[in-house]
Amino acid sequence: MKPESNRLSQSDSLYLRQHGTNPVDWYPWDEEALVRATSENKLIFLSIGYSSCHWCHVMEKESFEDEATAAYLNEHFIPIKVDREERPDLDSLYMEAVQLMSGQGGWPLNVWLTPDLKPIYGGTYFPPEPRHNRPSFAMVMRRLVELWSQDAATLIARAEGLTTSLQEDLFAHLPPSPVDLKVLGDVFTKNSVRFDAIWGGFGSAPKFPMAMWLRFLWRYASLEPDSQAHHMVVHSLLSMCRGGIYDAIGGGFHRYSTDEKWLVPHFEKMLYDQAQLLQLLSEVWVKTRHPLIKACIDQTGDFLDREMRLPDGGYGSALDADNAGSEGGFYTWTYPELIDIDASLAETFDLRPHGNWEGRIILERKTDRILHPSLLSALLEARERREERPTFDPKRLTSWNAMLLSAFCSLYENTGSPIWKQRALDLAGFLKRSVVQNGEVLHQSNGSVGFCQDYATLCESFCAMYGLTAEAEWLDEAERIAQQMIERFHDESTSSFYFAEPAADLLYRKKELFDHAEPSGNSAALTALFRLYRLTLSQRYRDIAERGVSALASLLSDHGLSLGVALQLAAELCADRSEWVLCEDETDFLQAHGEHPDPFRILILGEIHDKRRISGKPTAWVCRDFACLSPVHTRQALVDALQNR
C-alpha cells in the first residue's frame, strides 16, 4: 500500500518533496543512506533530477509511483534521490560516469553505485517496458541484482576501472600554447559547418540555444567583421524569438526545442537560460536595433519580475514543463480561443484550425510585427485564468542569480533604460545580504556550501556592479570573493579550477572541463579573474586567466561548441580592449556607447580615483588598461576620441 509520505516529504527541495509520497523508500543523499548501503552490502540506486524536468516526471509516474516496481527497488537497493540544483557536484560527477558508459547524458540521471559510491551502470530515462532500443527499468534492476549476487567481483572490478578513468586529471595532459586570432579562426571554421542556414542555431534536433557559443561568435564577428559570424548569431536569435521556444505571450525562453525549427520546446523555463540569453540579446540589440529583439528583451524582463522574482529580491530557479498532468498545456492554445480574443492574431502568427502540435497551437511568428500592449495583455489574462499553472521552484541559486545580475548590468549599459539599473541594484542587494559571508559564498540562500561556479559568477557580477555604480564596495567584495575562490579551488600546477572543495561524500574531486547548460566553473573562474584584472590591473589575476586559457588551447578547435565561455575570454585576450569612465550625464555618454558598441569595452558609470569631473562639467575618459586619453565633455567629442584612438 502506498505510504502517505517518505523521508523526502519534509525536504527543503521542491524536487525531493515531489517524490515525498512515492512508495519508493527514498533517502536523501546523507550519511544514514551511505552507512546502510555499506552495512547491508547493497547497491545504491541514485536518481538525480530537478523540479521542472519533464522526463523526470514521466519516469516518476511510470516507475516510482508503481507499487511493484517500488517494492523491488526497496528490497534490493538503497534508493537515493538528489536534486541536481542543490548538489551539482554529485550531478556532474555521475553524469560524466554515465556519459562514459553510454555516450549519452541528461535527466533524469539514474546510476547504480557500489556501497563505496563507485558507478557500475547508468543511463537517463528508463521506460517501464522495453522501448526504442532501451531496456525497461525492471530489466536493468533484475540484471544488476543477479550480477551482484552471483558475480559481485566482476561488477566491482568494472566500477573500479571506470572510477580510475574518471579520476584522471585531463588538465594534466593538456599542452599549453598561446591563443591568437588564427586559433580562433580555426575554431570558427571547424565548427561553423554545423550552422543551420535555414533555421539558425547549430546542429539538428533536439536544438539548444547555445548562448555561450553564440556569445563567442558575436565577439569573433567584432574581431573578424568579414566572417559570417554576425549573420549566424542574428539569424539564430531571430529564429528563436519567432519560434515556439520563446513564449510570445508571457515572455521568457523555454529550455530547448525538440525540432530543428525551434517550434516545439520542452516547456520548462530555467533562470540560467533567461540570464544568458538576455545578456546576449542585449549585446546584439545595441548593434542591430532590431525591434523584435528589443521586444523579447523587455517582455522577458517583465516575465522575470512577474513569475520568478521573490519578495526578498532574489529569483527562483525554474518553472515546470508540465501542468495538470501534461506537458505544454499552459502555453498552448486552441484555434477558437485565439480567434475569439482577436482574429488579427492570424496576421502575426501561423494559426491553423487543427493546430501545429498535438491538436493545439504553439505560437510561431510568421512576421515580426509587435503586438499592441492591450492585445498582449488580453492574451496573458486569458492564459492566467487557466486552472493550473506550471509549478514554480523558488530555490535561490547563487550562480544563476549572479548571471542574471551581470545581464541586468549589461542591459542598462546597452539600452539606458532605468528599469534595468533598478533591477540590478535590487538583485545585487539580495546577493550581498543573503549569500556572501566574509568572502565565503553560499550555493543558495539557505546556507549550503558554494561551488567554484558560485564564486566565479558572483565575482564577475560584482565587477559589473562596480561598473554600474562606480562604488568601491562592489570591487572590494569582488576581490575578496576572488581571493577565496583561488584559495579554495585553484590548482596552480595545471592552471585549472576544481568544481568543489574536498568532501567526504564525493568519490573524487572533479574538475569540469566543458560548459554544459551553464558555464563550467573553470571557464567562469578564468573569466571573472580577467575582468577583475581589467579593473584592478593586478597581474596575478591576469596571469591565472591567461595560463588557464592557454591550457585549453589544444581543445578549442575540436570542442569549441562546448567551450564557449573560454572562447569568449580568448577573444577578449586577442582584442583591442578599452575602458570608458563616464562621469555624470551618463545617459548622453551611453548613447555614444550605443552608437559605437564594442563587446570588449568596460564601462564605469561614475567617478573613480583621479578619473573625475573636470571643472564641474560632465566628463568622459577613454582608456586602455586605465592609461587614458585627455578627458572629453560631450558625446561628439567622445565619439571623436574613439575614432582617433
Image: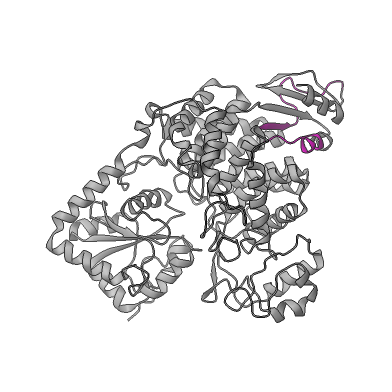
Residue 251 shows up from this direction: yes
Compared with 139, 592 (above or below) is: above
Q: Residue at x 45, y 67 (%)?
A: 55
Q: Nearer the viewer, residue 251 or 21?
A: 251
In the figure, residue 248 lies in which quadrant?
Answer: bottom right
Q: Residue at x 54, y 36 (%)?
A: 567
Q: Where in the figure is residue 151, as x and y percent of width and height?
A: 13, 59
Q: Residue at x 37, y 70 (%)?
A: 132
Find the magenta span and give its range.
Answer: 591-615
Q: Nearer the viewer, residue 89 or 126?
A: 126
Residue located farthest toward the left when viewing the structure as drawn: 150
In the figure, residue 250 lies in which quadrant?
Answer: bottom right
Q: Nearer the viewer, residue 416 or 371?
A: 371
Residue 528 shows up from this direction: no
Which quarter of the image is occupied by the N terminus?
Answer: bottom left
Q: Where in the figure is residue 615, as x and y percent of width and height?
A: 87, 20
Q: Residue at x 33, y 36 (%)?
A: 169
Q: Nearer the viewer, residue 396 or 293?
A: 293
Q: Where in the figure is residue 245, as x and y percent of width and height?
A: 61, 61
- Label the magenta part by its dominant secondary structure: loop
Which quarter of the image is occupied by the C terminus?
Answer: top right
